[in-house]
Image: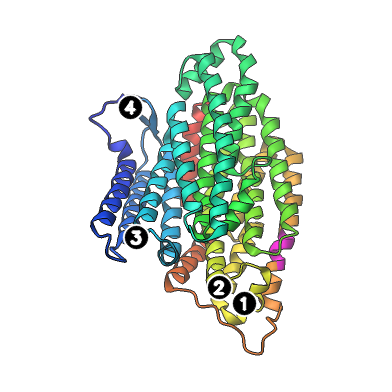
Amino acid sequence: MGDISFGSLGGILPELILVTGGLLILLLDIAQADRQDSGRGYLAVTVLFLLVGLTGILLQLGMEPYVVLSTTVIDPFATFLKLVIYTGMILVAIGGGSYMNRHATGRGEFWALFLLVTAAMSFAVSATNLLLLYLSIEFLSITSYILAGFLRTNKRSAEAGLKYFLYGSVAAALMLYGMSLLYGATGSLDLGEIAQALAANAEMAAVIPAATLLTLVGLGFKASLAPFYQWAPDVYDGAPTPITAYLSTASKAVGFAVMARVFVVALGAYRVEWAPILAGLSVLTMTVGNVIALRQTSVKRLLAYSSVAQAGYILMGLTAVVSSQQADLTILGMNGLNGLLLYLFAYLFTNIGAFLVVLAVEDTTGSTELDAYSNLVQRAPGMAWAMFIFLLSLAGIPLTGGFVGKFYVFGAAVQHQYFWLAGVGLVNAAIAAYYYLNVVRTMFFTPDGEAAPRPIAAPVAIQSVVLFCVAATIWIGLYPPRLLEWANSASRQLLALML
């Protein structure tokens, strides 16, 4: 991979477009401050559609990895994650944009932050430099704090933003300390050079445990891994539902993407030593998330704990990658990393679709409690059946995208002889099925106690996005070969750096 100069910035064109779009929205907001609607949301969606098309073309054509300005790599792995991020943000913008426009006091600020947080995520998944990694994650975190507490007159939203900020500040400080230890030991900020320095000098092994654990705290915070998940349920529950949908999908994907790049590229020489820690975190995360979800009476909070549990399943794929003694590139069906990518892609449509159904019910009834879903099949049959499919996918039922993701991460664990980890995952999947099916029971078999059913009025935008998410969830479950090809290409490239 060769470095390129300032004159060739085509590799970071998506990030430049996002930053320019965000600044342009702010300028439009200043120039048209007296108007209620100046089309800022349409501009944001247009920018995101452009980037989805661009990244899709790059994945289809394939590319040779190259580095921009010695800090950012343009490779299939980063491009795949960018497609996940841009797609998720489009779905959130279309499905939840009208809700935010009605309830937010500063539309221009919201849409500008929406594009800027997307730019931060895009930089983070491409960064190969510790300094850029930290700056990207911090900018992502700061903008997320603001978005979580964006409804200033809503006490729960303000509380969510404050809690997110307090937890995030501590996690960021610990992560920065861990990164500083890596830099101090190796004298480099580049992940590849760090790997070479660690492999060449066995004496540096003494600093690795502390550096890795501290860095893992910050990345585990973004991915909502236990025991760093405490912020997630309160923030997901209190934040505006469209922001919750983004935090539980695109933002989570960034945490896993950075974690994979750091572990595989910089710490690949120590993968056997750290595999048990990742496996333990996986078990703890999925178990804590599922067990606590059993007692939830709010569907939004239930999905929040479910999101924590899903992070534990995703981590199984990374555990299998890190535990590989030889980074076997020949068995691409179950290498762990492609399972992680597939899971993130399928989870994107499943979780955003589920939260948009929650948004429709919440917007009509003013409640996220399970009782609000009683007899939903009569009040909004389309939403009820869509939620049914999303819950099946979250449970990992065959013919859904969630099943494909679980099949590949569980298969990777078995392939690398983590039989006990796969067994714990299966037990947790059975626990999760109980509370998912409890929601199904309420929607289809529990009367709402009124003589006339109360219809759920969902805007056309939400209905359209939910329908698209249903189609994508089923498509991934039935016919995923193109997606598999992209995930295999992305995983092959990154795993090659571990050899």
Q: Quadrant of residue 393?
A: bottom right
Q: Which numbered mark, 3 or 2, is in the foreground of this view?
A: 3
Local SS, label 2: helix
**Magenta stretch, overall SS:** helix
Q: Looking at this rendering, what residue extends furthest in the bottom direction?
A: 451
437 in magenta? yes
Residue type indicated by callout 3:
Gly
Sooner in the amino-acid sequence: mark 1 or mark 4: 4
Magenta region, residue range: 433-438
Residue 184, numbered circle: none
Amino acid type at image mark 2: Met
Mark 3 neighbour class, 10 Å CA radius: few under 14, some 14 to 19, many 20 or more: many
| Residue at (47% x, 32% y) in the render | 134
Query: Which residue is labeled 4 in the image?
Result: 69
Rounded to the nearest angstrom, the CA distance separating label 1 from label 2 is: 8 Å
Callout 4: few (<14), some (14-19), or many (20+) C-alpha neighbours within 10 Å? few
Q: Position of residue 274 (x, y in %)?
A: 66, 27
* Front of the two marks 4 and 3: 3
